[in-house]
Image (tube, rainbow, N blue to C red):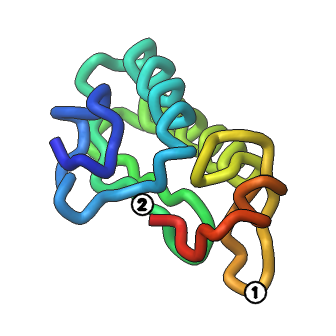
Amino acid sequence: MHEDLPRELDGHVFNPERSAVPPGWFPLLVRMHAEMLRVTPDYRLLQVKEKFGSLRVYVAQEFPPAVLAQLKRCAGFSVAQAWETCELCGSAGRPRPPEHWVRCDVCTSSSHTSPT
């Protein structure tokens, strides 16, 4: 598995070499993984990444409509939580201009200059 994703997603991401998220969002993805396993143990994600300061989760379309809708709800919940979670440390955060990276006050005031 790609080192820029939680190990729990191993085998569930179709294109791990094109997937990466900052470490502060790993817990969100681990919770999303647990929820998706409850929907179907063979769920598949096409890609998981940070883009323009937001979490992007692309769910494979290979499931019946009801299952796909549940998987997309799981992904959507994690995406929404990422807007309030520091991508560096996982604490409560918010988008910070001008780059709109999601950071907490501590990480904003530290010397961190990029999310990865």
Q: Is residue 65 left or right of residue 61?
A: right
Residue occupying the far bottom of the picture:
98
Residue for badge 2: 49
Q: Amino acid at mark 1?
A: Pro
Q: Residues within 10 Å of mark 1 (few under 14, many from 20)?
A: few
At numbered mark 1, what does the secondary structure look like: helix, strand or loop? loop
The residue sitting at 75% across, 86% down in the picture is 98
Instruction: Measure how far apart labels 1 and 2 are at the Cα level.
Output: 20 Å
Q: Which mark is residue 85?
A: none
Residue at image mark 1: 98
Can you say whether 101 is above or below 78 in the image?
below
Q: Residue at x 83, y 56 (%)?
A: 105
Label 2, secondary structure: give it: strand
Figure quadrant of residue 81: top right
Instruction: Where is residue 24? Give x, y as percent.
Output: 56, 45
Query: Is 99 on the left or on the right of 4, as rendered?
Result: right
Q: Position of residue 33 (x, y in %)?
A: 42, 27
